């Protein structure tokens, strides 16, 4: 069994979209897959459809009921803020050790590949002392880093890579997901990121792939490649 952590360079870059495509690629290849998003903010319990959690539950072919929502996202917060701020507004907090243990237990289930989707960007605070980066490092799972193609993504992406490398995290891939507005063709952005990765990576740089929106996993080979590499162990 293997777990992959799907992290982002920021909010709204396409983490859920890429996680869903990985689920679909795994299911198409007969790989038993599970996907969770343990922490979600901006979640409306009265209207869960359309949320990131709902997207993952649907991709797994499960009904969108309270049991499956809770199983995927135990830490749900109403305000669309960083998890520490959203939790504080509800008089709650994320117990970091419990979060890490929840993910580890999930990865020890019957799935051959477990996808753990993060929240926000790599350095988003979870509580008063921990960030998403601390969460990733505690799990020690390979990371699929999702970036956008918007203006500013080069700095955001390379900074996230540098932070992950500094914490000894394995980068499985960098996925450049198409943003609604982009200053240049997405392929040019991906090539630039790829060019700057070697000096930042302690080992062989990860593959960099373009992910257009609106397509399916069949026309983006990186999803199948990741499933074959990590879902067959």
Image (cartoon, rainbow, N blue to C red):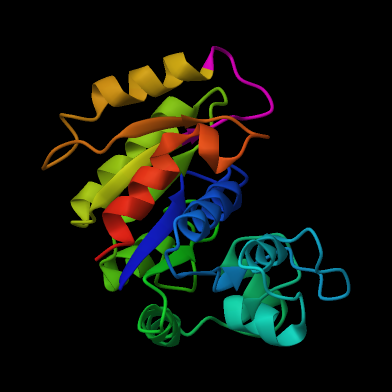
Q: Is residue 53 visible?
A: yes
Identify whether 131 is placed above or below 203.
below
Quadrant of residue 195 within the rendered picture: top left
In this picture, which residue range is highlighted in magenta? 176-185
> In the image, is residue 181 part of the stretch drawn in magenta?
yes
Q: Quadrant location of the C terminus?
A: bottom left
Residue 182 in picture, x, y percent from top left: 61, 20
Q: Quadrant location of the N terminus?
A: bottom left
Point 77% across, 81% down: residue: 65
Point 46% across, 17% down: residue: 187
Q: Is residue 160 visible?
A: no
Q: Nearer the viewer, residue 78 or 14?
A: 14
Residue 126 in picture, x, y percent from top left: 49, 69
Identify whether 77 is placed above or below 118.
below
Point 39% across, 60% down: residue: 5
In the image, taking residue 121 as reference, residue 71 lies left or right, namely right
Q: Nearer the viewer, residue 31 or 16?
A: 31
> In the image, is residue 206 part of the stretch drawn in magenta?
no
Point 46% across, 43% down: residue: 146
Residue 20 in picture, x, y percent from top left: 58, 54
Q: Main secondary structure of the magenta part?
A: loop
| Furthest residue toward right | 46
Residue 192 in picture, x, y percent from top left: 35, 18
In the image, taking residue 133 as reference, residue 87 lies left or right, namely right
Q: Nearer the viewer, residue 112 or 92?
A: 112
Q: Nearer the viewer, residue 38 or 107?
A: 107
């Amino acid at each position: 069994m293997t777990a992959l952590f799907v992290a982002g360079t920021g909010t709204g870059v396409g983490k859920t979209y890429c996680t869903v495509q990985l689920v679909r690629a795994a299911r198409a290849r007969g790989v038993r897959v599970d996907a969770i998003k343990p922490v979600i903010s901006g979640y409306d319990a009265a209207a869960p459809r359309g949320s990131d959690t709902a997207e993952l539950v649907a991709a797994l072919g499960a009904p969108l009921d309270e049991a499956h929502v809770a199983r995927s996202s135990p830490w749900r917060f109403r305000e669309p803020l960083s998890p520490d701020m959203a939790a504080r507004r509800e008089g709650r907090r994320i117990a970091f050790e419990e979060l890490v243990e929840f993910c580890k237990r999930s990865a020890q289930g019957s799935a051959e590949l477990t996808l753990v989707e993060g929240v926000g960007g790599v350095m988003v605070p979870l509580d008063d002392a921990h960030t998403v980066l601390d969460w990733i490092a505690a799990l020690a799972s390979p990371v699929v880093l999702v970036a956008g193609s918007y203006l500013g993504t080069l700095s955001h992406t390379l900074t996230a890579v540098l932070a992950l490398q500094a914490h000894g995290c394995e980068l499985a891939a960098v996925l450049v997901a198409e943003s609604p507005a982009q200053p240049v063709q997405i392929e040019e952005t991906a090539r630039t990121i790829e060019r700057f990765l070697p000096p930042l990576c302690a080992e062989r740089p990860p593959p960099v792939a373009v992910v257009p929106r609106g397509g399916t996993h069949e026309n983006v080979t990186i999803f199948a490649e990741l499933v074959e590499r990590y879902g067959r162990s």
